[in-house]
Image: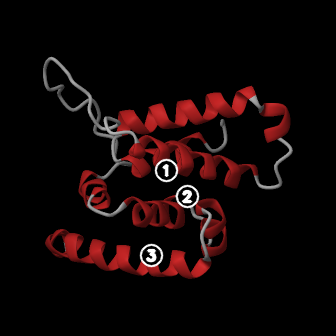
Amino acid sequence: MRERGTALSRTSVFLVGDRHLGEDLLQEVLARLALRWSSVRRADNLDGYVHRALVNTATSWRRRRSWHERPVDAVPERASNDASYDDTVLQALLTLPPRQRAVVVLRHYADQTEQQTAHLMGCSVGTVKSQHAKAVARLRELLAPTVGDRA
């Protein structure tokens, strides 16, 4: 966690689309892994194991009807101006279907190969490629006006 904490945190935020939920996701996954650490630490690819746990837990959360509902008394002010979470990109990612979002996050933010991503998601490399192509095309549509403004 000391070495990969920032990257894992960013991955979890992009998987669920919210900084606080992302922190909760990472905390839940790490707590589960800690309970089984004697067997987890023997994994051939510990980083991949943690990423797969993040994807699977995020998917499980999405299946619950109220995973995104968080009632509050008042709308909080923005807590941070953390540049590692670009709101424009995050909002664009949230428009993608969950599998496409997971592919983009794993490929671009967790720096996984197509093969690693396929293994982590439990699908074929072809599925990763097609989901990635669709996701990137959609993100280009959404972000092109924003990128053009910065040029």
**What separation in Å lies between label 2 and label 3 (alpha carbons)?**
14 Å
State the image coordinates of residue 26 (x, y, percent, origin top left).
53, 37
Q: Is residue 125 left or right of residue 74?
A: right
Question: Would you place residue 14 above or below residue 122 in this image?
Answer: above
* Amino acid of disc 2: Ala
Quadrant of residue 91 within the rendered picture: bottom left
In this orientation, does residue 147 appear? no
Residue type (three-letter) at the residue carrying disc 3: His
Residue 110 image label: 2
| Mark with earlier residue (2, 1) | 1
Residues marked 2 and 1 touching at CB (< 8 Å): yes
* Residue pictured at 57% horizontal, 64% vertical: 111
Mark 1 crowd level (few <14, some 14–19, many ≥20, 10 Å Cα)? many
19 versus 7 height, above or below: above
Mark 3 or mark 2, which is nearer the start of the sequence? 2
Residue denoted by label 1: 11
Visible in this render: residue 72?
yes
Q: Residue at x 35, y 36 (%)?
A: 67
Residue 118 position in % (x across, y down): 61, 69
Residue beneath disc 3:
132
Q: Amino acid at mark 1?
A: Thr
Report, in whole angstroms, how far the alpha carbon at label 2 lies from the one at label 1: 6 Å
Q: Position of residue 150 (x, y in %)?
A: 19, 69
Residue sitting at x 78%, y 32%: 37
Tell me how many marks there are: 3
- Colour mode of the rendering: secondary structure
Dot in front, 1 or 3: 3
- N-term mark: 1 or 3: 1
Q: Secondary structure beneath disc 3? A: helix
Residue closest to the eye, 129 or 60: 60
Apparent side of residue 9 relative to residue 32 in the rendered image (left or right): left
Question: Compared with residue 122, is residue 32 higher up or lower down, i.e. above or below?
Answer: above
